[in-house]
Image: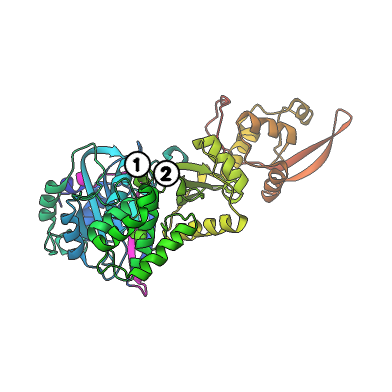
Amino acid sequence: MTDISRFKAIFQGLDIAYGTYKIEGSRHDGKQSGKAVVVRQPPTDDLWVKHIDGIEPSLGIIPIRADNSCIWGCIDIDQYPFDHKGLIAKIRSLELPLVVCRSKSGGAHVFLFTKEPVPAADMQAYLNACAGLLGQAGREIFPKQSEILVERGDTGNFLNLPYFAGDESLRYAMHDDGTSATLEEFYEIYDKWVQDVPLVIPEGPKTADHPAKDGPPCLQALCSQGFPEGTRNNGLFNIALYCQKAYGSAWQDKVMEYNNKYFGPPLGLSEMQLIIQQVEKKEYKYKCKDAPINSFCNAGLCRTRKYGIGGDAPDAPDLASLSKYNSEPPLWFLNVNDKRVELDTESLFNQANFQKACMEKINVLPPTLRKPDWESMLNALLREMVELEQIQEASEDTSVTWIFNDLLEEFTTHMQKAMDREELLLGRPWTDEDEARVYFRMKDLDAHLRRNNFTGLSAPKIAQRLRDMGGEPISMSLKNRTTRAWRIPTFAGQDAPFDTPEMKKRSPF
């Protein structure tokens, strides 16, 4: 049997669910397409063995654990074709302890491993800083959540593991020269770069003159690495904003100094003066979403800098990683400013309800956005959720319909029954054995549902459920007065007797 003990120890993650991905073809952009599924069961040793042996479907592990810690994380560079050797050279020049693997589609999975579990938020912060230094800001970071609400059905996102099919895999780690590593060689690479904890967030190389000191880390990275051709105007514009904040009346001279020192070749005098005049006329914000600084962004670190984005941060809340637990009704999970929030559909759809939910759950009041902006943001999140297949099916016994049927059966079958039809007035269901029908008053059923904390269906919907199972409302004469009641087909009996159950609270989810 294939030995998976070392591999499994390195890639341990959530132990109550795993992901599978079966390749079915390729898209026009080169990315392999297939079927991704989250399975809400522990990943067994057999699944790990089949992964290494190359037996479809391959195994995906969710890096964040139930206690919101992890021992590995990954920057997912979804780009084809990709210069893996160039990326590795940049990683080593920046002295980052990262391991590069080829992804299933030919992109790169850039891993960080730790010897002991670290908070998922720390892993995210470290990898976001690395992505910014590498010019890969905005790439997917795993773990995608800093916390998950496991008890509510939330599981987080899985990543397909390397070494599917072992040494025959196309998902291999790489040596520093860009050549493929066998599985045993991967273990040696792991041993070399696995990190002690706690993690210290990398800030990039320090130069003698400390360019953009206390300023945005993107500008520091670009000053040390160079501004790409075609981005110099935007680059110098952001440099001018920094200089205006940092150097007071001398800021224009500093812009000229940065232009001559860090731009190759420098912008001409007329172009530079135009940028200075533009910045001087109006109060601008850093162009965080534009090249070249967008690829080197580290917003979390930038907010801590004296001359970083600070108050220039966008007003919109930072929303990410929407997933859906397809219960009845569905539950939604969303990262709001790096906090995991559970929402019902109305709280996700309605901005006012969303703001209220954020206040209740994470003590934050997101600012009100224009309706078109809010809808555009939601549509983008939903598209990403569907594309990444972050919709998890709930088990049948968590649905409102199943719970209602279970409580209805309990009420009509297991509770104290009426000896005759008049005892309906005592709140007891009465069964007509000849008709195979059970009679009850709606208010008595409603009392039973409320005792069990069931609020998942309104009265009209309960009535419709009863009709769907062949029930009907009727009028009965009991003790010389007209009583409204329902009758439905009896539930199938069983041989073993039931003990009278204790009333217990039951969640509709």
142 w.r.t. 31: above or below: above
Cα distance in 3D space between marks 2 and 1: 8 Å
120 w.r.t. 256: above or below: above
238 w.r.t. 425: above or below: below
The image position of residue 195, as x and y in percent, is 18, 42
Q: Please identify the residue farthest to the bottom as the structure is shown.
A: 28
Looking at the picture, which amino acid does disc 1 mark? Ala
Question: Which type of secondary structure does the marked residue at label 1 adopt?
Answer: helix
Of residue 413 and residue 65, the one placed in the foreground of this image is 65
In this rendering, position of residue 432 left or right of residue 193: right
The image position of residue 366, as x and y in percent, is 54, 44
Q: Which residue is mark 1?
A: 121
Q: Which residue is mark 2?
A: 338
In this rendering, position of residue 292 left or right of residue 350: left
Bounds of the magenta span?
9-29
Looking at the picture, which amino acid does disc 2 mark? Asp
Residue 41 in view here: no
